[in-house]
Image (tube, rainbow, N blue to C red):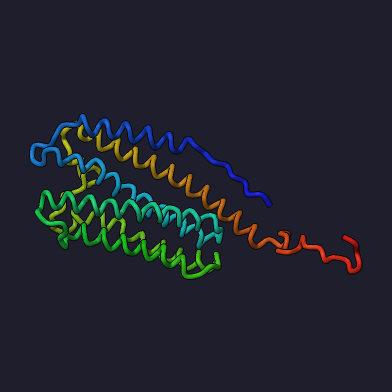
Amino acid sequence: MKVQTRIRWWPWAAVALSLVVAFTLSMISPRDDVQGELVRIMYIHVPAAWLAYVAFFMTFVGSLTYLLTKNLRWDRIAAASAEIGVFFTGLTLVLGMIWGKSTWGVWWTWDARLTLTAIMFFVYLGYLALRRTTDDPVARASRASVLGVLGAVQIPIVHFSVVWWRTLHQPPSIVRPDSPAIQEPLMLITLIVGVVAFTIIYISLMIKRIELTHLEDQLTEIEHSTDQPVAGEAVVVPELGARP
């Protein structure tokens, strides 16, 4: 059996274009009156947090749909989205620590938003670790899907923690009960463009990760195929008495 490789290159072009536009706007956007140039971290930090929410929500959708349909395709979607979400949650935490050191004077404080985000990060690391406990795809999907559904409860709690409790972390910039907190038009546009750009990055990464998953499935099928030649099968036993 031959591995079918269908590679799409347009997702990388979409990622490059969206990043160029977002970076350009972040450079021409005005500096903040209080934070100065440091405010430019927001244009990566906020979209990264948004992307983590989207990724973990898709893990919830994929996990729930798998539990209802038992179609392994949805489990693969859930797993791919969780991998992306874990990466960008880690990026969110690192950028938040850099921002916190400059504004609060410490790398880390047990603020509600920070603590809950860290817990969410480790929960989904546990989700990925759980998937490695067995090679049986059905058992793996069944176990992981339960955690994928339950873990989604954290998303609204993390996001609205700065509204529900008194915290050091600033309130939501865009998705909030009232109007957006940013009043400067160019800063708000830049942030929205950054969120859109990171959403395009998420879609592109999902496409490439699912492509990789299909290749992995084909290789697994080849490895377990009974039509493959056995090692040494081509060796011919010489006939006794035959002349060279």
| 52 to the left or right of 229 | left
> What residue is shown at x 44% (from left), y 55% (from top)?
61
Q: Position of residue 223 (x, y in %)?
A: 63, 60
In this view of the protein, which residue sits in the foreground, 29 or 215? Answer: 215
Q: Is residue 10 left or right of residue 172?
A: right
Q: Tell me which residue sits at (76%, 63%) in the image.
A: 233
Residue 139: image x %, image y %? 53, 69
Q: Quadrant of the C terminus?
A: bottom right
The residue lying furthest to the front in this view is: 244
Q: As displayed, is residue 3 above or below residue 238?
A: above
Can you tell which quarter of the image residue 43 is in? top left
Q: Nearer the viewer, residue 202 or 54?
A: 202
Residue lying at 9% horizontally and 54% vertically, measured from the top left: 105
Q: State the image coordinates of residue 2 (x, y, percent, origin top left).
A: 66, 49
Residue 71 in the image: x percent, y percent?
Answer: 56, 58
**Residue 72 left/right relative to 14:** right
**Residue at image location 26% in from the left, 43% down from the top:** 44
